[in-house]
Amino acid sequence: MFHGQRLSRSLPPLAALALSSCTLHSVATDFNGVDGVRGVPVEYQTTSTWALNGLFVFPLIGNASKATVIDEFTKEAAARGASRQRIVQTSSLTYWFIFPPLSFFIHPVNTTVEGDVESD
């Protein structure tokens, strides 16, 4: 019983560590033949980055700052052959509330950038 209790307590921090410092990209390409405003096909790209921060501002593992995620967004768009991109929305969430009191000091952070990507 004691080992199961210890394991159940250590799983959430291990899961947070496993998810930290990764960047995920997703692209929506099917708009049923409808072109964008410029008359060329548009893709909608989402880039999310996870990291672990300390005391809300110090990156410990990874970097989920908006500047870093925008850089990752534009790198992915360029790798997919984009000639134009327009950032539509950014969001950032610090998960300070999930493992109190530990998460008051060390917490996962997620930053997401979404936008339109066009190719010529």
Image: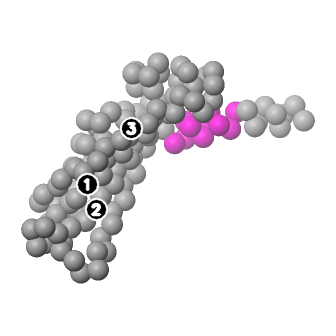
**Amino acid type, callout 3:** Ser
> Of 28 and 75, which appears nearest the observer?
28
Q: Residue furthest front?
A: 37
Above or below 58: residue 82: below
For numbered disc 2, what is the local secondary structure? strand
Q: Position of residue 20 (x, y in %)?
A: 48, 38
For numbered disc 1, what is the local secondary structure? strand
Q: CA distance from mark 1 to mark 3?
A: 15 Å
Dots 1, 2 in contact, CB < 8 A? yes
Residue at the (55%, 21%) spot, across then down: 104
> Which labelled disc corresponds to residue 115?
1
Q: Which residue is mark 2?
A: 44
> Of 58 and 56, which appears nearest the observer?
56
Residue at the (47%, 18%) spot, across then down: 55
Q: Which residue is mark 3?
A: 92
The earlier-in-sequence mark between 1 and 2 is 2
Q: CA distance from mark 1 to mark 2?
A: 6 Å
Where are the magenta residues, as a range? Answer: 10-19
